[in-house]
Image: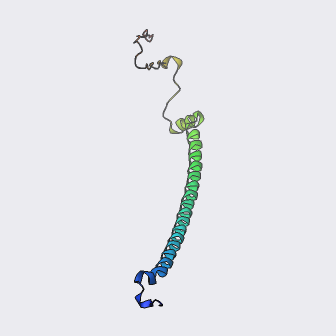
């Protein structure tokens, strides 16, 4: 006797449709994920390019500022500025300059050695 379609269970009738729907959802989800991932890669690439340009711009600006600082700190420029401002400043003589030794920094555990004190002769 042939089976009647009405007597088949609901799962057997909708089984192939559910499989097809699941396969479509899986393929669609993978496609959406792929497009989202490509979009993220594109955004990161744009950010990298933007930051590389900003870095190059800042390097150029730093180079220009270093050159400007060197010009402003040059002895000839300072002498000219002193003459222009007429402050009456002059170079100190050799006897006016005191040379002070830099203190020695010791590490932990080294014995304390008191250096011989030198007094300035005046």
Q: Residue at x 59, y 47 (%)?
A: 64
Q: How many marks?
A: 0
Q: Height in image: 43 above or below 75?
A: below
Q: Is residue 117 left or right of residue 77?
A: left
Quadrant where the C terminus sits is top left
* Colour scheme of the picture: rainbow
Residue 120 placement (x, y as % from top left): 44, 12
Front position in the image: 107 or 89 = 107
Front position in the image: 78 or 68 = 68
Residue 60 placement (x, y as % from top left): 60, 49
Examine the image and state in which quarter residue 48 appears: bottom right
Residue occupying the far top of the picture: 116
Residue 106 placement (x, y as % from top left): 43, 19
Residue occupying the far front of the picture: 1
Front position in the image: 116 or 69 = 116
Q: Height in image: 77 above or below 42?
A: above
Residue 44 placement (x, y as % from top left): 54, 60
Front position in the image: 45 or 24 = 24
Q: Height in image: 101 above or below 68?
A: above
Q: Residue at x 51, y 68 (%)?
A: 33
């Amino acid at each position: 006797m042939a089976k009647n379609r009405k007597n088949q269970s609901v799962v057997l009738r909708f089984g192939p449709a559910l499989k097809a729907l699941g396969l479509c959802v899986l393929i669609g989800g993978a496609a959406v994920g792929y497009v989202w991932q490509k979009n993220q890669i594109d955004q990161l690439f744009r950010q990298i390019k933007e930051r590389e340009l900003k870095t190059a711009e800042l390097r150029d600006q730093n180079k220009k500022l270093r050159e400007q600082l060197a010009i402003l700190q040059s002895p000839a420029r300072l002498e000219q500025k002193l003459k222009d401002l007429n402050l009456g400043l002059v170079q100190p003589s050799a006897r006016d300059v005191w040379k002070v030794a830099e203190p020695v920094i010791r590490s932990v555990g080294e014995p304390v050695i008191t250096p011989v004190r030198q007094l300035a002769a005046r």
